[in-house]
Image (tube, rainbow, N blue to C red):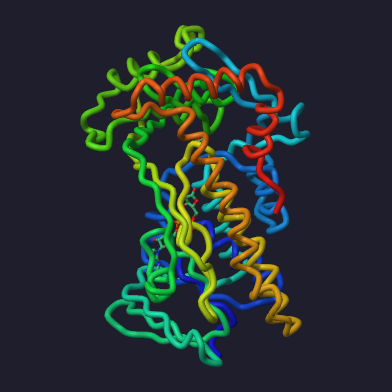
Amino acid sequence: MDHQVVIIGGGPSGLLLSQFLNRSGISTIILERSSRDHVLSRIRAGVLEWGSVEMLREAGVSARLDAEGIPHDGTLITDGDREIHIDFKALTGKQVMVYGQTEVTQDLYQAQDAMGTTIVHGVEDVVIDDLDAAEARVSYTRDGARHTLTCAYVAGCDGFHGVSRKTIPEARRREFERVYPFGWLGILSRTPPVNDELIYANSEHGFALASMRNPNLVRYYVQVPLSDRPEDWSDDRFWTEFKRRIPADAAARLVTGPSIEKSIAPLRSFVSEPLRWGRMFLVGDAAHIVPPTGAKGLNLAVSDVHYLHEALVKALKQGDDSGIDDYSARALDRIWKAMRFSWQMTMMLHRFDDEDGFAAQMRRATLAHLASSEAAQRDLAENYVGLPF
Ligand code: APR
Ligand code: PHB
């Protein structure tokens, strides 16, 4: 056998799984379609649950996270000028850490380099075979030559558009999906954050989010129609719209500046079951997508890695298959709870174009209840800081 585990995809899921397995003495190889620069150019969300922070510490990749991450004790949820402060620390005893996913990925590449793990970039036409045989086989093309690897297990960490999920016969897969009729236009700008905590803003003009990367770099978003393109949004237009959606006191102190990146992402909820097919396991975006409203995407990938790493160590080191038999059910239990939370946050905070007056009233009543009920705030806080693994 060439490797114990072949990992398809060198995003955060594949890198973190490999890092954990290597530290447990299990050999891996990572096959990634894109270049490292391309993987590291993707700007993704920036909030880590405390459980994710602890996982990154355990993986030995937290030096920069601990030095540069910004712990947050709470967040602001606003409805027009009404401000609802959700105090995570007081309500749950926990915090979250603001640290960009791109930085996490970079730290993981560095750690994997130090481990000496082989990461093959530029692979094409990956085919996964023999998942019900004694050894699985993964073939790919690189620089025009075809290669084949044998392994005990395959980890499908290749994101929503990857091949791993599609290796499971369609008739044996169950897919659940909700596509939302809007996207998020995000900008990066070298300006100081408008608030020391994130602001999730509902307004009559639609949703806006004020996030940050560091004391002089912000990530701000506005909800836009799916038909919009980034070119439709000059910086001026963005700032005008953003100001209309956040509370007046925040708008008054907002510092604007040129954007250094601008992109639009659609919002989707998606789950594919099961997560195991013979010798292959799906991890992260390969199996599930959440809308970014709950900041759960990367955090769910981390909890999948937690379950799968434990399961593979048991199987490969102790010959005990109970963990791999349970992986799909265990991971899905937590995934569905995060799906629900992300969906609920999305419904609570966005304006739907074709909505009727009733839907708008439900959103306002949900926010009014959140403003006045500590139980509702604790429920939100408990989910936002992350349910236990
Ligand atoms: N062969 C090899 N690699 C592939 C293939 C393929 N056929 N298809 C996709 N990939 C690679 C992609 O190029 C990408 O680098 O798999 C990687 C998947 O990475 P992500 O999409 O980042 O998914 P994942 O690692 O599960 O990360 C979890 O959390 O916040 C969310 O969506 C966000 O990326 C984030 C995710
Ligand atoms: C981000 O910083 O990009 C971010 C933060 C919180 C979210 C989504 C995105 O819910």
Q: Quadrant of the C terminus?
A: bottom right
Q: Residue at x 40, y 58 (%)?
A: 160
- Rendered view: 31 above or below 286: below
The residue lying toward the viewer, choosing from 57 and 389, is 389
Q: Which residue is depicted at the point 69% across and 43% down?
A: 50
Q: Nearer the viewer, residue 41 or 196?
A: 196
Q: Position of residue 387 (x, y in %)?
A: 68, 46
In the drawing, does residue 98 fall left or right of residue 189?
right
The residue lying at 46 percent from left, 33 percent from top is: 347
Q: Quadrant of the N terminus?
A: bottom right
Between 216 and 30, the one lying in front of the other is: 30
Q: Position of residue 163 (x, y in %)?
A: 38, 70
Q: Give the mark count.
A: 0
To which quarter of the image does residue 223 belong? Answer: top left
The answer to whether residue 362 is left or right of residue 67 is left
Q: Which residue shows up at 52% across the image and 18% down it? A: 78
> Residue 372 at x, y = what percent?
65, 17
x and y percentages locating residue 74 in the rendered image: 66, 27
The image quadrant of residue 227 is top left
In the rendered image of this protein, does residue 206 appear above or below residue 80?
Answer: below
Instruction: Indicate left or right for 162 with 20 as reference.
Output: left
